[in-house]
Amino acid sequence: MVDVVATRRMLEGQLQELLERATGIEEVLSDRGDSDWEENAVEMENDEAMAAVGDVTKKEIQDIRLALSRLNNGTYGVCTGCGKAIAAERLSELPSTSTCSRCA
């Protein structure tokens, strides 16, 4: 059985960390850069890598928000693919997962 209170607390903590990370990424990406052409080329490469990290972070934020929504409506731990219970071990490893191992 999943400890709903502990799971909610942990997901909310992860969400807060990810939101802070996303804010930092947005700040870095919004920097206008250097007036030096060569320096700008290096910064553009770094921005591409940072944008990729930002995309992953946004996906994680979305997954956590969906997991919190499932906690709120009582469907947390139920596979969105087959409707069966998600194993407690899987939920402890991947608390924001929405699918069982078979459907993943």
Image: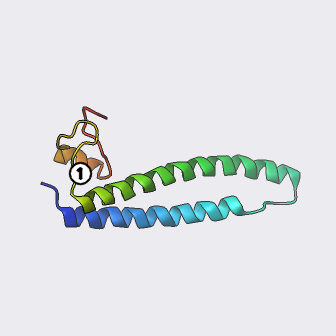
Find the residue positioned furthest to the right: 36
Pointer 1 residue: 92
Which quadrant, please, contains the C terminus? top left
- Under mark 1, the amino acid is Ser
The x and y percentages for residue 88 are: 17, 48
The x and y percentages for residue 21 are: 52, 62
Taking the image as shown, residue 42 lies to the left or right of residue 29, namely right
Find the residue positioned furthest to the left: 1
The x and y percentages for residue 81 are: 28, 37
Q: Nearer the viewer, residue 35 or 103?
A: 103
Which quadrant, please, contains the N terminus? bottom left
> What is the quadrant of residue 28 in the picture?
bottom right
Colour scheme: rainbow
Taking the image as shown, residue 79 lies to the left or right of residue 43, namely left
* Above/below status of 24 relative to 64: below
Assign a secondary structure to mark 1: helix
How many C-alpha atoms fall within 10 Å of the one at disc 1: few (<14), some, or many (≥20)?
few
Residue drawn 24% across the image and 39% down it: 100
Residue drawn 27% across the image and 48% down it: 93
Q: Nearer the viewer, residue 18 or 74?
A: 74
The x and y percentages for residue 63 are: 39, 52
